[in-house]
Image (tube, coloured by chain):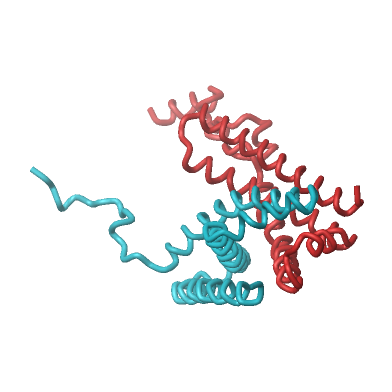
Chain colours: A cyan, B red
Amino acid sequence: MRNTERPLSPHLSVYRWPITMTLSILHRATGVAMSVGLVVLAAWLVNAAAGSEEYQQFAAMMSTLTGRLVLIGWSFAFFFHLGNGIRHLVWDTGRGFEKHQANASAWIVLVTAIAVTAIFWIVLL
Amino acid sequence: MDRAGHGNRRDGHFLDRTAMSLRAPLGRVLGLGSAKGGTDHFWGQRVSGVALVVLGLWFVASLSVLPSLDHHIVVEFIGRPLNSVLLSLSSLTAAYHSYLGVQVVIEDYVHGPGLKIVSLIISRFGHVFLAVVSLYAILKIGLGA
């Protein structure tokens, strides 16, 4: 017989999904995404050093729709990871751990990252 | 009976309360615990992170004020001495920060000691390779070779 009264260890599915969990996962995901992005950054530098023709080819590849979407994704990853990294550094000083503070800073980081990404591309294009 | 037992413990070495710890004297002196490492990973991640706040903002701001990303403009930008230096620092710090981050991800998600170690080695080689490639490209432009 199943004993439903026994104590269960809390599992992810027990909690109402809080914004702070999304930010935590996004921090790692954007970090990994940018690690991959380092390859493209290095390729950009190498092609710039290689010469005008090589650079043209690289730039053409990055100007395709896929290339653009990837670059926009990486720029968001950068701004998000930057903002949330600062949030982590504030936590490292022992501040901002109250539930309402962590929720507020989460929304601030998320909205700021989206806004700055938009501004960055408006300026760049 | 208790007293006798207590006396016996005192005589015997490893049952004595003060000698009960299984930590070797050397381990106690080094104070590193079971992780075999100190706080260098934590600090490396934070300090490189602080540096990248500054370097990253500089890089993004510089890109966005360039008139275009055409070849001659990009090369001219990278070639200026201060930019070469800051870009080199950015590449090296980013590679270091990235290595530390990826290391934690691998340690968390890659199971099995063999695959884990192979992944960590590949990640380390890859990051060092990227750092050297970037540095070489920047220097090549900066020195006009």
Closest to the observer: A118 or B42? A118
State the residue at coordinates (46%, 34%). B111
Q: Is residue A2 visible?
A: yes
Q: Position of residue B100 (x, y in %)?
A: 63, 47
Q: How many numbered badges does the structure rendering display? A: 0
Q: Position of residue A75 (x, y in %)?
A: 60, 64
Q: Position of residue A50 (x, y in %)?
A: 79, 47
The C terminus of chain A sits in image quarter: bottom right
* Residue B26, quarter of the rendered image: top right
Closest to the observer: B112 or A95? B112
Q: Position of residue A58 (x, y in %)?
A: 67, 52
* Residue A86, quarter of the rendered image: bottom right
Left or right: residue A35 versus residue A48 is: left
Which residue is at the far left?
A: A1
The relative height of residue B116 versus residue A108 in the rendered view (above or below) is above
The N terminus of chain A sits in image quarter: top left
Closest to the observer: B139 or B72? B72
Which residue is at the far front?
A: A53
Left or right: residue B86 versus residue B22 is: right
State the residue at coordinates (51%, 69%). A97
State the residue at coordinates (49%, 71%). A106
Left or right: residue A52 versus residue A73 is: right
The relative height of residue B72 versus residue B143 in the rendered view (above or below) is below
Closest to the observer: A35 or B66? B66
Q: Is residue A88 visible?
A: no
